[in-house]
Image (spheres, grey):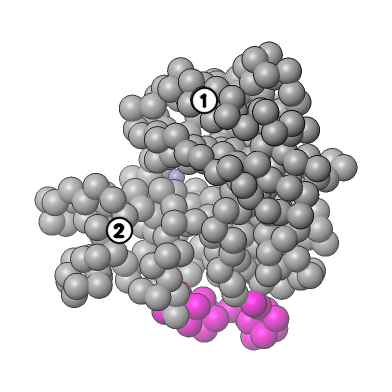
Amino acid sequence: MIAIGIDIGATSMKAGLVSDSGTVTKERSFPLGEGSSNETILSGLRELVQNLIPHKPVGIGIGSPGPLLADSGVLLSSANLPKVQNLPLKACLEEEFGLPVLYQNDANCAALAESLFGKSADWDSCLFLTLGTGIGGGYVEKGKLFGGFEGNGFELGHTTVVIDGALCGCGHKGCVEAYFSSRGFQNRYRERSGTDLPLAKDFFQRVNSGDKVAKEILDEGVLCLAEALRNAVHLVNPEGIVFVGGITEAWNLFGEDLEKRLRSSLFPILEKRLKIAIGLPQAGIVGAASLFFLPKV
Ligand SMILES: [Zn+2]
């Protein structure tokens, strides 16, 4: 069985053909940015899907940041795509291509991919984090995705780690995403140095080259992320945590510190059990397509 998997992120949409063994072929992408509107996304999706349709997929699976209505297939809004509002993804694509469309939160899709094909496939339970422009969260227990109502569960990025702290893209203050994400690092760096860093890799390059401000911001981010993870681990007691997303490429700059801070803050019974791993690079696409490989999510 083959399905189209599409991962809508803040800087691009990625699409590919995914087999029911988790293999991705014909991967393509379409650029997005803060100025992207409903129409930008729809025209990008048309272009991506048109190229994959001849391969006879059973349907189109889509993952995106939320909040969203998973069952009716509507992207309500997104902190990092501010011009997108009430976008009826499912209705538009079903009408245009005559194929069924399934839709879920992007971090839930990544969680699904990892639990089917990744390192956590044989774990009892796993917490998933997507570390990119923002932070997404997902949770799978005994093979079942915890979606929450309409797919909006486990929005770990928007849990509070600093009361009345830094402003987040969602409009609230003190979310962990405001401290540990590409957008968060860029905003904190601009506030403290007056310098714009267009890409997350520019920030990590500065950390790597010994920039004191960048290092302080990363250290603060690690503290905040460790605190958010501590809360989540005490809440659900997972067998492990899997991290995916672009920021994991810089894992060597923060991973050890993050793990140390997290482990030292947990109840020993929880810490003893906890596994930590980096996930599949294409988890978003694979997970979106995998919505078709399950009887019911
Ligand atoms: Zn937030």
Q: Residue at x 45, y 74 (%)?
A: 255
Q: CA distance from mark 1 to mark 2?
A: 28 Å
Give the left or right position of residue 80, taking residue 18 as reference: left
Left or right, 275 with respect to 192, comes to right
Q: Quadrant of residue 273?
A: bottom right
Which residue does the image show at 49% across and 48% down from the upper left? 158
Which quarter of the rendered image does ligand 1 occupy?
top left
Picture quadrant where residue 2 is located: top right
Q: Is residue 273 magenta?
A: yes
The residue stretch that appears in magenta: 257-275
> Which is more foreground, mark 1 or mark 2?
1
Is residue 61 shown above or below 47?
A: below
Residue 15 image position (x, y, % from top left): 56, 39
Determine the secondary structure under disc 1.
Answer: helix
What residue lies at 71% left-to-right and 54% top-to-bottom?
A: 22
Q: Which residue is mark 2?
A: 201
* Residue 86 falls within the magenta-colored stretch: no
Dot 2 alpha-carbon crowd within 10 angstroms: few under 14, some 14 to 19, many 20 or more: some
Whether 176 is drawn above or below 126: the answer is: above
Left-right relation of 173 to 54: left
Numbered circle sitting on residue 47: 1
Q: Residue at x 68, y 53 (%)?
A: 23
Secondary element type, mark 2: helix
Give percent across and percent down for residue 21.
76, 55
CB-based contact (under 8 Å), mark 1 and mark 2: no
> What's the amino acid at mark 2?
Lys
- Can you see residue 260? yes
